[in-house]
Amino acid sequence: MPLIQGLLEYWPRDNPLKEKLLLSTLLEAIEKSEVDKIEHLAKQIFRTLIKCIGGQHLEVSHRAMCFFENEYF
């Protein structure tokens, strides 16, 4: 899916506000996608989430952790 690939490719590493917005957008895009169409992006998605969780900004970490509370994810 081009939208998810684009989000992951141009992820803003130094801007917590944009990271929070993109995490919300990423979760919404994943929820509306078919699993077989985004399965090849799973590694890249998890790498991005791990970086967000391990980051210094608490709100970004919390938003990334919300992915694991989502039933679809």
Image (cartoon, rainbow, N blue to C red):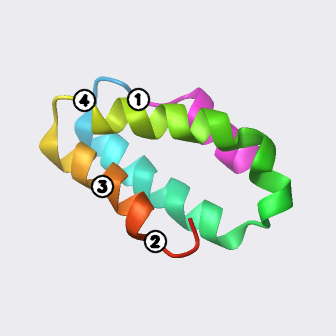
User: Of the residues tagged 3 and 2, which is closer to the observer?
Assistant: 2
C-alpha gap between disc 3 and disc 2: 11 Å
C-alpha gap between disc 2 and disc 1: 23 Å
Residue 33: tell me if it is visible. yes
Q: Position of residue 5 (x, y in %)?
A: 69, 39
- In this view, the residue in front, 21 or 30, is 30
For marks 2 and 1, the one nearer the N-term is 1
C-alpha gap between disc 1 and disc 4: 12 Å
The residue tagged 2 is 70
Question: Which segment did they paint magenta?
Answer: 1-12
Residue type at mark 2: give it: Asn
Badges 3 and 2: C-beta atoms under 8 Å apart? no
State the residue at coordinates (84%, 55%): 37
Residue type at mark 3: give it: Arg
Q: Quarter of the image holding residue 55? A: top left
Q: Residues within 10 Å of mark 1 (few under 14, many from 20)?
A: some
Q: Residues within 10 Å of mark 4 (few under 14, many from 20)?
A: some
State the residue at coordinates (64%, 35%): 43
Above or below residue 53? Residue 37 is: below
Residue type at mark 4: give it: Gly
The residue tagged 4 is 55
